[in-house]
Image (spheres, grey):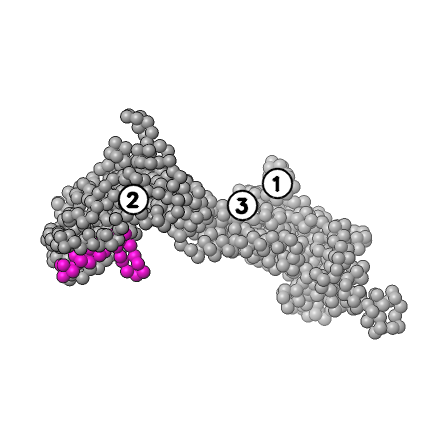
């Protein structure tokens, strides 16, 4: 599973349940370097949850997320047939399953049983025996990346900005590079001031978040994430909490970022942005990707009836 | 800051006014409540006063009962802190105070005392293993160099033992630095058992009870001080003082007082 | 009225001037401040630790329970210990705790001031812990997520982001707890410590008057509380400048 070239982020069989509420029901996707993937969908469709699973702010119920070929989530046994084969459940079921399907050859039989276990969610991780556990541990050890390291490479921008209320704008931006990357105070400040200048807020360094407008806050939030030099930026409805007149200033900063080649995953309702900046548009509804395409085709020739219905409402 | 001063002043005035009213509330008759003789005591001082179940018992309690009988009054006992007895008696809250109380110069300034009804001795309790054998052993050096050793003595707060011990060395005490005042005599003895203090100075009778109840303690043969116990009565009520004195002398001559004392204290 | 005033002057002389009794109040006041100050420090220390354990457990219970593992078991264990501590300390009067500490737990200690400081500190810690936990839980969840999304681990996020904000939220309640503690130390006399209240008691026991010593003691407590409240109000104003 660790091969396959350029995908910056790869998502395999992602499920997320909140109790009995099944928000994500099997999402697989790849995001390549330099891509701007725009995720749209009706509210409650699971698009924000999908985004938050990418940096593990939500822990997936099933499925794996890989960043630059390193495993971010725990190992999902259902994605590894060799793990299922080592499980006690598999061992117990094999004889009777063979009797039920006498026509199958040995390899076919195993594959069928693995598929059966997978589809019916029959594994109980705590009781699958040492061999199974050891194999999962080995896979994890060989492939995983520390979650905090992974998050340093994944910048995130929230709908509600979430600037640190107790810190000045400058400290908001410099705290992570200084504490996590060991950057010197002088260098961190110079970079922060430079970035603030680029988003048009050169004079706000010493203000507190509460003194800024929504649009200004969101631009600072983007700068804060950029200060860590991330490989990819996640945007969770970055303009939804803004007054209409402030949406433009934030979108401009995002467009500029895209132009500079930043890999971005953007959950948004801004169809104009999707069409203009997106390299790919993804429609999520009822916890699955219903359709994805280049912006041109996505908007001009939508195939899925739900997408057509959605577009007719928002455009 | 001005505001604070103002607030403080107002509170001060209010408190003073309250005090004025309180002292006006005393009735003119023989006792605070007609037909009742209210006695204040601190019932943790066996065998003079202590509690037995819900009732009070002890030498003072029984003598007080007889006095009330003589005066034709009903006896009511209030159990308060020792230090609050004299103040309460003088303010008229209680008619009399009876709590193994010694007559001292200081106390005489505030209240009147009846004739003596019993003799008290301030004893020194130490651990059996202690090297102290008299009060003088608490000191080292001679003449002007005389000073208290590095020791602590436990006492019951506000008792004569406390007042004597807390006084300066010249006045026959140990100085406050060497005294720890506990709320009850029992606390002081528990502190001695735990090794927090080196000795406890307390009235002889309760001292015997404490030594009997706790292993490893002994009473020094030489007492710290001897004193006379008496009943305290408000200076504003000389009539009651006279009545109590005549009742006491009747009870003493009839041998009833001795009877009660010997009942509690095996000679 | 004139007589009453001269009587008052006499009382004042008797209670404070004679035998330099005012020095008792001064010494007692010092003792009260020492006990309160160090007990507050201990209380805050205990409070931070317990609040961190308890809120960590509350926040991560769901996700950690699923995974199990030794980390979760250790956290569960400490959470239980903290719960027990809170129950016992908040369920018993401070005087009883003080007496237990003095006569049973630290029976061999002859330093009663230290015992009192430990006792009041441990008592206060239970209340401070719950104040802090409430504060941590009331810091916006987004602040925590923003910290984590930058790559801070749980503890770093707590230290750099959550706890500084929590302090601002809990300051008024914390100030209140300090005032309560200051007044609660008045039971230190039970173990023979000469604090402010005890000093007043001792004066009362020797002058046999109630008014002067009690009012003096009350006024000193009151003055401390008023001054302290003013200081906190000023501090609060300064902290508030980050959210106009």
Q: Residue at point 68% right, 55% down?
A: A54
Distance between the alpha carbons at the discs numbered 3 and 2: 63 Å
Distance between the alpha carbons at the discs numbered 1 and 2: 68 Å
Distance between the alpha carbons at the discs numbered 1 and 3: 14 Å
x and y percentages locating residue B156 in the rendered image: 30, 45
Q: Does residue B128 show up magenta in the picture?
A: no
Q: Nearer the viewer, residue A40 or A154?
A: A154
Q: Which residue is identified by label 3?
A: A167
The circle on residue A178 is 1
Across the whole image, how many numbered discs are drawn on residues?
3
Task: Determine the chain carrying the residue at label 2.
Answer: B
Q: Range of the magenta residues?
A: B47-72
Left or right, A74 with reference to B90? right
Q: Which residue is identified by label 2?
A: B202
The circle on residue A309 is none
Q: Residues within 10 Å of mark 1 (few under 14, many from 20)?
A: some
């Amino acid at each position: 599973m660790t091969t396959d070239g350029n995908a910056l982020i790869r998502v395999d069989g992602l499920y997320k349940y909140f109790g009995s509420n099944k928000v994500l029901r099997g999402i697989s996707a790849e995001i390549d370097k330099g891509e701007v993937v725009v995720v749209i969908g009706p509210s409650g469709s699971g698009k924000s949850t999908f985004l938050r699973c990418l940096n593990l702010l939500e822990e997936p119920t099933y499925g794996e997320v890989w960043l630059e070929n390193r495993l971010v989530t725990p190992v999902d046994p259902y994605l590894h047939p060799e793990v299922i084969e080592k499980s006690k459940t598999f061992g117990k079921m094999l004889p009777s399953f063979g009797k039920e399907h006498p026509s199958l050859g040995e390899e076919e039989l195993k594959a069928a049983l693995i598929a059966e276990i997978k589809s019916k969610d029959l594994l109980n991780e705590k009781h699958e025996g040492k061999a199974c556990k050891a194999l999962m541990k080995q896979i994890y050890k060989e492939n995983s990346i520390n979650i905090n390291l992974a998050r340093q490479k994944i910048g995130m921008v929230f709908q509600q900005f979430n600037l640190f209320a107790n810190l000045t704008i400058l400290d908001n931006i410099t705290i992570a590079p200084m504490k996590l990357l060991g950057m010197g105070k002088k260098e961190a400040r110079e970079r922060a001031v430079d970035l603030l200048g680029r988003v048009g807020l050169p004079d706000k360094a010493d203000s507190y978040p509460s003194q800024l407008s929504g649009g200004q806050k969101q631009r600072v939030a983007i700068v804060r994430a950029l200060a860590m030099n991330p490989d990819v930026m996640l945007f969770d409805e970055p303009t939804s909490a803004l007054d209409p007149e402030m949406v433009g200033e934030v979108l401009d900063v995002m467009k500029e970022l895209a132009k500079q080649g930043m890999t971005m995953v953007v959950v948004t309702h801004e169809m104009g942005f999707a069409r203009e900046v997106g390299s790919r548009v993804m429609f999520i509804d009822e916890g699955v990707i219903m359709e994805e395409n280049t912006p041109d085709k996505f908007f001009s020739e939508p195939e899925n009836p739900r997408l057509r219905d959605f577009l007719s409402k928002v455009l | 800051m001005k505001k604070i001063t103002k607030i403080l002043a107002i509170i001060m005035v209010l408190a003073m006014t309250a005090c004025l009213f309180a002292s006006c509330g005393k009735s003119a008759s023989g006792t605070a409540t007609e037909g009742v003789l209210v006695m204040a005591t601190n019932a943790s001082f066996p065998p003079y006063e202590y509690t037995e179940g819900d009732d009070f018992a002890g030498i003072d309690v029984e003598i007080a009962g007889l006095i009330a009988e003589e005066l034709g009054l009903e006896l009511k006992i209030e159990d308060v802190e020792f230090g609050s007895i004299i103040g309460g008696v003088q303010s008229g809250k209680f008619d009399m105070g009876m709590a193994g109380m010694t007559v001292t110069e200081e106390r005489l300034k505030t209240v009147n005392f009846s004739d003596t009804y019993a003799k008290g001795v301030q004893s020194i309790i130490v651990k059996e293993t202690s090297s102290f054998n008299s009060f003088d052993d608490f000191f080292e050096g001679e003449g002007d160099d005389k000073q208290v050793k590095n020791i602590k003595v436990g006492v019951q707060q506000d008792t004569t033992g406390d007042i004597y011990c807390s006084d300066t060395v010249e006045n026959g005490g140990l100085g406050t630095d060497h005294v720890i005042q506990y709320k009850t005599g029992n606390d002081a003895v528990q502190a001695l058992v735990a090794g927090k203090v080196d000795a406890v100075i307390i009235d002889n009778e309760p001292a015997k009870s404490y030594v009997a109840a706790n292993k490893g303690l002994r009473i020094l043969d030489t007492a710290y001080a001897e004193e006379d116990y008496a009943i305290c009565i408000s200076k504003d009520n000389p009539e009651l003082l006279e009545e109590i004195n005549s009742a006491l002398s009747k009870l003493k001559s009839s041998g009833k007082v001795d009877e009660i004392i010997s009942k509690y204290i095996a000679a | 009225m004139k007589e009453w005033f001269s009587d008052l002057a006499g009382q004042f002389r008797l209670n404070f001037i004679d035998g330099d009794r005012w020095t008792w109040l001064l010494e007692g006041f010092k003792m009260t401040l020492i006990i309160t100050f160090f007990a507050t420090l201990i209380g805050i220390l205990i409070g931070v630790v317990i609040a961190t354990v308890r809120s960590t457990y509350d926040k991560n219970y769901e996700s950690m329970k699923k995974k199990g593992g030794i980390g979760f078991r250790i956290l569960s264990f400490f959470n239980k210990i903290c719960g027990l501590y809170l129950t016992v300390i908040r369920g018993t009067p401070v005087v009883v705790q003080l007496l237990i500490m003095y006569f049973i737990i630290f029976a061999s200690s002859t330093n009663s001031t230290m015992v009192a400081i430990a006792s009041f500190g441990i008592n206060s810690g239970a209340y401070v812990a719950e104040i802090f936990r409430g504060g941590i839980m009331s810091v916006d969840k987004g602040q925590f997520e923003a910290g984590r999304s930058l790559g801070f681990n749980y503890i770093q996020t707590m230290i750099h982001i959550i706890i500084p904000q929590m302090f601002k939220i809990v300051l008024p309640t914390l100030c209140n707890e300090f005032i309560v503690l200051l007044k609660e130390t008045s039971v230190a006399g039970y173990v023979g410590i000469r604090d402010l209240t005890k000093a007043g008691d001792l004066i009362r026991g020797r002058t046999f008057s109630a008014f002067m010593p009690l009012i003096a003691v009350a006024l000193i407590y009151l003055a401390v509380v008023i001054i302290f409240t003013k200081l906190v109000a000023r501090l609060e104003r300064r902290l508030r400048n980050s959210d106009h």
